[in-house]
Amino acid sequence: MFARIDRAWARLLWLLMAAAATYIGAILVLIIYITVCRTAGWSYESLAFVAIEYGFVYTLFLGSPWLIRHRGHVYIEMLTAALSARRREVLSRLIAALAAAICLIWAWYSGKLAYLDFTDVIYDELRGQYDIKRWIITVSFPAGFFLMGIEFLRFVFTRAPMHGGMAGIASERAEIEQQQAIAAGRR
């Protein structure tokens, strides 16, 4: 049952990451559109600029949980690489717990902000001419922080801790070592 839940959760995170990647592609197209129009002296739809601005926030919060799950986020292993395996595991789980707590606290407070923005009639001060409510951007904060908190929390309870103890390019080194172990097992 837990394996099925984990697969469904992983699929959800992948879909969010795919949406973020698609949005990044759209942002690139919009940047080209605006640049060509400006260079040629043509007018362009200024809402494209708003889509770019808001897109950066959405792509951050849509893609980050998937990056955390696959250890693709930025973290430094200099300290954990210098520790024994047992101490590294304890420290790694403490770091993951702290990161989860921070994300969940941010989810709570940004959720309150999003709720206030949703129940209030305040417009985005910079984008008032488009009748864009501020909650449209702030709703991504609690959702993203909550999903990131869950992913960090997974590293507290999973078998393999977040930190592998390899200084340098850890994820690539871990992948190379895993491939070497698989190749050695087949021989």
Image: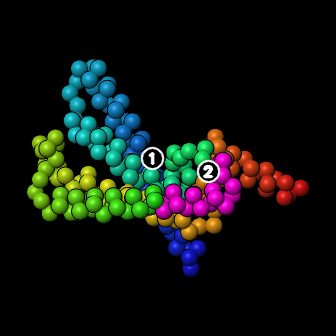
Q: Residues within 10 Å of mark 2 (few under 14, many from 20)?
A: many
The reply to whether residue 143 is visible in this rendering is no
Horizontal arrangement in the rendering, residue 37 relative to residue 5 (left or right) = left
Mark 1 Cα shell of 10 Å, populated few (<14), some (14-19), many (≥20): some
Is residue 118 inside the magenta stretch?
no
SS at mark 2?
helix
**Is 126 displayed left or right of 99 in the figure?**
left
Q: Amino acid at mark 1?
A: Ala
Tell me residue 84's x, y (percent). Answer: 69, 55
Task: Check if mark 2's residue and mark 1's residue have beta carbons within 8 Å.
Answer: no
- Locate the N terminus by quadrant: bottom right
Q: Position of residue 172 (x, y in %)?
A: 66, 45
Q: Nearer the viewer, mark 2 or mark 1?
A: 2
Kindly tell me whether residue 144 is visible in this rendering.
yes
Disc 2 versus disc 1: distance between alpha carbons? 31 Å
Res 161 quadrant in image: bottom right
Q: Residue at x 33, y 47 (%)?
A: 57
Amino acid carrying mark 2 in the image: Thr
Q: Residue at x 14, y 63 (%)?
A: 119
Give residue 183's mark: none
Display coloring:
rainbow
The answer to if 84 sits in the magenta stretch is yes
Q: Main secondary structure of the magenta part?
A: helix
Q: Earlier in the sequence, mark 2 or mark 1?
A: 1
For disc 1, the marked residue is 21
Magenta range is: 81-97
Which residue bears the numbered disc 2?
Answer: 80
Q: Residue at x 60, y 47 (%)?
A: 79
